[in-house]
Amino acid sequence: MSGFGVDRGSAASQSADPGSTIAEALIDAKGDLIVGTAANAAGRLAVGANETRLVADSTQETGAKWVADTTNYAIAAKGNLLVGTAADTVAALTVGDNGTLLTADSTQASGTRWAAPEEVLGLESAAFEPTTTFWSTGDVKLTIKTTADSGWVLMNDTTIGNAASGASGRANADTADLFTLLWTNTADAQCAVSTGRGVSAAADYAANKTIALPKALGRALATYGAGSGLTNRALALPTGVETHVLSIAEMPSHDHPGSAAYGTAGGASASILFATNNLSAGYVQTQGGDTAHPNMQPTLFLNTMIKL
């Protein structure tokens, strides 16, 4: 296949295949384009005006044309976005204010718009509960509040159950999921079910039984399981004591100074035990008060809530 060349009227170009040459006269301005025509010939597409763009157009002899730019493609500011419209065209979405969020909105031509965070997240709606969005049943959080948030219950060593259960913490139908989770994941020794566990969580719940929340009042929180070199701890297990009295076995090994020996005194034939280094009363009298010593580390006390 021979390539195209520019015909400047030279003898060499005149002798070439006429179909492989392009007349130089086709180009008469900077930016002109040489394009193929419907007749399979070379044609000139004059350069467009400043800021115009080249688009395909089958109605044109050259199959293309320059058109004026429109706001659909205008990027006039930092942060502007190009988005598709319902008419299958491209539109410019002007950048939003600082802190706004991009949200879908089918009522807009672009299908999107910038909106305030509280609107996007639904915070303006009375039915919105942030806890529902970001937490799930059984999640626990610390708080300085003394009243549980909506959808939560304080872990204050009480019980939960259905509306007829008489539970001390919360007796309501919204406890069903947490009741089931505690019934499934903990033992009765940690989260006791009133009158004992039956065949299933659903059966016990329907029977108006209660289940105890994990005991958290006055206790430090730790992760359950068997840490390296540590004792295995069950889920929801309460353990440890606030104070402790040492037993003899727990006391450090130690000696009491002084000595004694057997001998006779006053010609008596019986042997007696006597001190050899003037033992004082302090060596033989009972000492200590059997008072419990505190085990508590420096601690901050907060409330805990568990998600229903």
Image: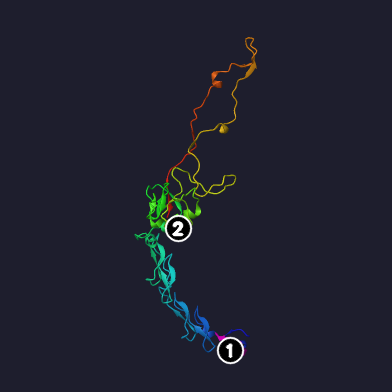
* Between 197 and 88, the one nearer to me in the picture: 197
Contact between labelled residues 2 and 1, with CB atoms less than 8 Å apart:
no
Q: Position of residue 87 (x, y in %)?
A: 41, 77
Q: Return the mark for residue 19.
A: 1
What kind of element bears circle 1? Answer: helix
What kind of element bears circle 2? Answer: helix
Magenta span: 13-23
Q: Return the mark for residue 4.
A: none
With respect to residue 43, does 220 lie above or below? above
* Between 259 and 304, the one nearer to me in the picture: 259
* Between 191 and 118, the one nearer to me in the picture: 191
Residue at image point 52% right, 83% down: 35
- Residue labelled with disc 2: 203
- Quarter of the figure with residue 91: bottom left
Quadrant where the N terminus lies?
A: bottom right
With respect to residue 32, does 196 lie above or below? above
Q: Could you tell whether 108 is left or right of 249 in the image?
A: left
Q: Position of residue 239 (x, y in %)?
A: 50, 43
How far apart are labels 1 and 2 at the CA level?
90 Å
> Magenta stretch containing residue 22, yes or no?
yes
Q: Position of residue 263 (x, y in %)?
A: 65, 15
Q: Position of residue 122 (x, y in %)?
A: 38, 61
Please state the total of marks drawn on the protein image. 2
> Magenta stretch containing residue 229, yes or no?
no
Amino acid carrying label 2: it is Ala
Residue at image point 64% right, 17% down: 262
- Quarter of the figure with residue 106: bottom left
* Between 290 and 91, the one nearer to me in the picture: 290
The residue positioned farthest toward the top in the image shown: 266
Residue at image point 62% right, 90% down: 15
> Is residue 135 visible in this depiction of the protein?
no
Amino acid carrying label 1: it is Gly
